[in-house]
Every structure is written in structure tokens, then in C-alpha cells.
Image (tube, rainbow, N blue to C red):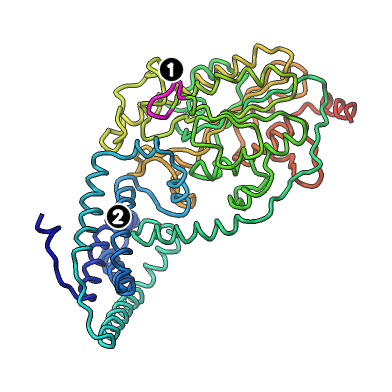
Amino acid sequence: MHLLTGRWQLSATRLALLSALFFTLLNYGFFRTIWQAWRSAGGDGTFLWSVPLFIFLCLNIIFHLLLLPYLHKIIIPLILLLSAAVSYSVIFLGVYFDRAMLTNVLITTPAESAKLLTVPYALWLLALGVVPALLYLRVRVVYRRWWRELALRLGAVLLSLALALLLSHHYYQEYAAYGRNNHDLPHLIVPTNFIVASISKIKHQRRANRPYETVAADAHQQKTDPQRRVSVFIIGEATRAQNWGLNGYARQTTPKLAARGAEIINYPQVSSCGTYTAYSVPCMLSEQPRATFDVDIASRRDNLLDILQRAGVRVVWYDNDTGCKGACANIEYHDMTALNLPAYCTDGECLDDILLQDIEQPLAGAQDTVIILHTIGSHGPTYYQRYTPEYRAYTPTCDTKQIQQCSREEITNTYDNTIRYVDGFIERVIARLAREKDWKSSVFYVSDHGESLGENGIYLHSTPYSVAPAEQTRVPMMLWLSDAWRQDGAVDGNCLHQRASSGEYSQDNVFHTYLGLFDVQTGGTVYQKELDLLEAVYNSSKYLKKRKTAG
């Protein structure tokens, strides 16, 4: 207790040096990542020893500038607390803290946050955040006369800058090569990672304050037949392609879909827009391709759902995740988690079957309809809460949110069980639509992003796309078409399966495929038929004849 009640006197220069040293040690996760990559590349070991010194010198400059009278007593303790929280995720979860991760943190629900708050995490925050912050507050900074204080600080900054430049010059080739090939490594450095992320977030927020833009104002349906069209679009959560049974995984994690045989069109090579929900969901519903997608622009313009609704299609969103990320702003929306039904829900999170409770209401109508089911799917770290006992096919399982304490086998078993539940959920949706023989109905499933299960020390998702492992960017995607679709001869089934199994696809295909499914016509270049999964496989003789008649 004396440490917290006592009081020390330190010069600003010494306090800055101690602060820089503390934060250098806190960047163990950054140094470990560099060491692992450099070792695998067979690089010069002396370069590695220069990196901590370089970081220390840069931090020393920063803290000399931050030690402003009075203000530093607010700024530095706050930085200590935030750095402790971020460093834990960097070190133990392999998290890159950039603007995307900051966005992910800001939209995280209390239920999700509670899952991440473990005993080790709390102890880490206490030991490396709360206690250092309290100790810092007990330090009395002894300032010299203003001209001498200024001279000494300026000297310390210039000396640190000179040494940092000397190091970077000596190891120029190594620093340049490593920086060129690893643009996202700075997102591992505390406290600059979350400070830069906050500045970037503010800039993007300002750009978002732009006029709303209407897309495809002339959208209308030009149907080739009078049959009602109903589609259920299932957005998966954190389900990766590598563990998807239909993709040739060692385990058959999708037995019910596999049992349907040729009814299921599976796409084994699909890339996601992003590695987190708030990016991937708006992206897959936007006419902007992933290569140029800007989430801020997307938030202020029409997306696929708006265009379908304008064309006369009823669009309904049922949510069991953390919201639609702005994608459903103009359509009918239902938060199923808010129902908190005991049969499905525990601690603020629900099994995906809750999404089927109200689905009969839009199905009962006569209007062409798109129903979006936003699932919680395979969201971690509590994989064991994503399925019911009958789907616990693989054991032993990891029945804790502290997944780092589980073996790879336990984590994989638990995760694979979540996919079996997803498989059963999709089957229940298909079975419901299959009862309507007169509808041209479809079920379209695609996961928002993948998931890391401990490969190379990385867990969960949200790694920057440029350095994200394939486990986070490769996602399952499948399509089911009703008998009314398959039997009218408009779709060449053999060609569809062949193209699905051999082609490379992405979430960019979602937008254009749905416009095609509902025969939505638009002016300009909004609709691109080469990205419509079905356009290239329509039976030309029958389909074109129907098109001509309808026109």
C-alpha cells in the first residue's frame, strides 16, 4: 500500500525515459511478430535487436512532448489504461488494432464484451494498467527553470531522433524491405496504434457526413413469368471455408446439405469483402466492388435492399447478431435478440433458430419477398454456446471463453460443431421453402468473414485484410433453387455446378445475383451480368424466349 500512498519526485526527463521503457516492454507482441517472421525468412539477427531500441527512442520522443504541466496527469494515465487493454489482445489474441478494429470495439454489444472479459484479462488490466496509472499519479514532476527545461527536453528529443535515424540508416535495407512487405505491423504498437486508429476514425466520420445518394432510381421488375419469387438470404457469422464440409473438409460438417445432392450449388472458392462484420455486410450489399469499397460512402447511398424495395419487392431483415451495420436503414427490421426467449437465449445471446419464429408472416403474403436472416453462426470466443447438444458431434470441446487455454483439437471440435448447427439451420430454411411448390424460391447463404482458430497464434478475426490469413478471408457460399426454378428449364443445372466448383467468386457476386433472381432492371451500369451467378447458366433458348415475351 505504501507504493500507492507514497510520493516520488522525478524530473520530466527521467519520467519520460521510464514511460518510454515501460511502453517498450509492453510491445512484446509486436517484437514477437517481427522475430517470428524474420526467423522464418532467415534474416540477420542483429537487425532484430535494433527494433526494440528504435521503438524506445521513438517513444522517448513522444513522451517528452506529452509531459505538459498538469495535462500529462490526465493524458498519460489514460494512455496506460488503454494500452494495457489493447496490449492483451495484441499479445494473446494476435489482434491488429487499426481503424477497423476500433470500429469493431465501438459496436460490440455488452454481451459480447462480457465474453471477452476473463480473469487473466482483468488481472492484466490491473497489473499493467490500473496500478501503473495510480503510481504515475503519485509522481511529482520537478520542473527546472523554463529555459533550462526547454533546452534539456529539446536536447533529449534531438538525441533520440539522431540515434533513431542512425539505426534506420544502418539497417536501411532491412527496415525498408520489412516495412514494404508488412504495412500493417504498426497496428501492433501501443499506444500509437489506437491513437492513430482514433484519428483515422474521426476523419472517416467526417467524410461520412455527406448527402445521401440514390442508386438505380429507375429500378423495376421485368419478370419472365407470373410465379411468386421468395428468397431467404442467410448471412453467416465467422464461418470459414476451410471447415465447411461441402468444400472437401476432412469432416463432413454439413451432412444435411450434402444429403440434398445436386439441389445444392456450392461455391468452394469465395473471398470475403473484409474480416469483420461492419465492413463485410455493407460491402456485399453494395454495388461498389471490394477493391474500391468505402464503408463511409456506402452508409450514405442506396444498397441492394433499397433497390429491391424500390422495384416492388418486400424486404425484411431478421437479426440475431449485432445489428445490420447500417445496411437495413430503410427497410423493415426485427431485432430477434431483443425478444430474449428462454428457449433460445442465454446471457444476451441467442441460438439462430430464434430467427425462424416470425418468418411465417412475410411468407404468408403474395408479394415477391426477400428475407434476410443475420445469424450469429460461429462467432467466438464462446463457440460452445452456438449449438444445441444434438450438434455436439466432435469431442472433447472447449467449453470456455478463454480459448487460449484450450488445445487446438478442443477449439477445432467446438468450432466444427457450430458449423453442424449452421448446416441444420440452413436445412430447416430450405425445407420450409420447399413446401411451396408454386414459388420460384431460393436460399442463398454466405458467411460475412472467416475465423482464426489459433493458427500462428492468431484467434478470432478482424486482422487487416492485407495481412489476414486465408482462414479469415475465405468463406463458404451456397445456393439452393426450388423445383419451380429447376424444372422450368431456365437454368442449366450441369453448367451451374461446373462453374460453381471451378470458378473464383467473392461477396461482390451477391448484389448482382439478387438483381438477376428478381428480374430487376436498372439503367446504366448498376447491374453487371458477368457478376450474376445465374446469368451465364440460363438456358438460352427458353430464357430468352421468356424475356422477349415479357418485354
Residue 515 magenta-drawn? no
Give the quarter of the image for residue 284. top right
Residue 343 in the magenta stretch? The answer is yes
| Badge 2 amino acid | Leu
Q: What is the x, y in percent for residue 339?
A: 49, 25
Q: Earlier in the sequence, mark 1 or mark 2?
A: 2
Q: Where is residue 469 in the image (x, y as percent from the top left)?
A: 44, 45
Name the residue at the bottom extreme. 147
The answer to whether 96 is drawn above or below residue 347 in the figure is below
Q: Give the range drawn in magenta.
A: 340-349
Rendered image quadrant of residue 543: top right
- Name the main secondary structure of what is drawn in magenta: loop
Label 2 near label 1: C-beta < 8 Å?
A: no
Q: In which quarter of the image is the C terminus?
A: top right
Residue located 60% across and 20% down the image: 359
Image x and y of residue 442, in percent: 66, 23
Residue 191 rendering spot, x and y as whole percentages? 34, 60
Please give the residue where the numbered disc 2 appears in the rendered image.
Answer: 81
- Residue type at mark 1? Ala
- Residue 343 is labelled as 1
Q: Which residue is drawn at 90% across and 26% down?
A: 549
